[in-house]
Amino acid sequence: MTESGEYHSHNTKQLKEEELKEMLMRLKEIEEDLREFGVKK
């Protein structure tokens, strides 16, 4: 990768807590775990 094309904290969007939670809740693995443990979204 070139220097300008590198992936690091200065060129990526930092998610707010609610954005991160929404993203994680869409993952199949998370949905399955929540269902397995009887946790409601």
Image: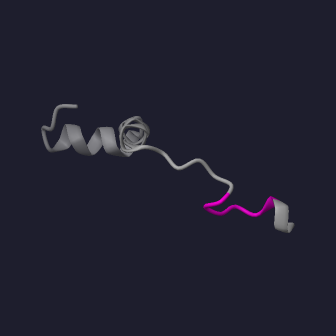
Question: How would you classify the magenta stretch by its main secondary structure?
Answer: loop
Q: Quadrant of residue 28?
A: top left
> Where in the figure is residue 15, as x and y percent of width and height?
48, 45
* Quarter containing the N terminus: bottom right
- Front residue of 1 and 10: 10
Find the residue positioned furthest to the front.
Answer: 10
Residue at the image position 39 percent from the left and 35 percent from the top: 22
- Front residue of 38 and 1: 1
Q: Quadrant of residue 16?
A: top left
> Where in the figure is residue 17, as x and y percent of width and height?
37, 44
* Quarter containing the C terminus: top left
Find the magenta span and give its range: 5-10
Is residue 1 something that shows in the picture?
no
Find the residue positioned furthest to the right.
Answer: 2
| Left or right placement of residue 39 versus residue 18 in this view | left
Q: Look at the picture and state if 5 lies above or below 26.
A: below
Q: Look at the picture and state if 2 lies above or below 33.
A: below
What colour scheme does the image use?
one colour
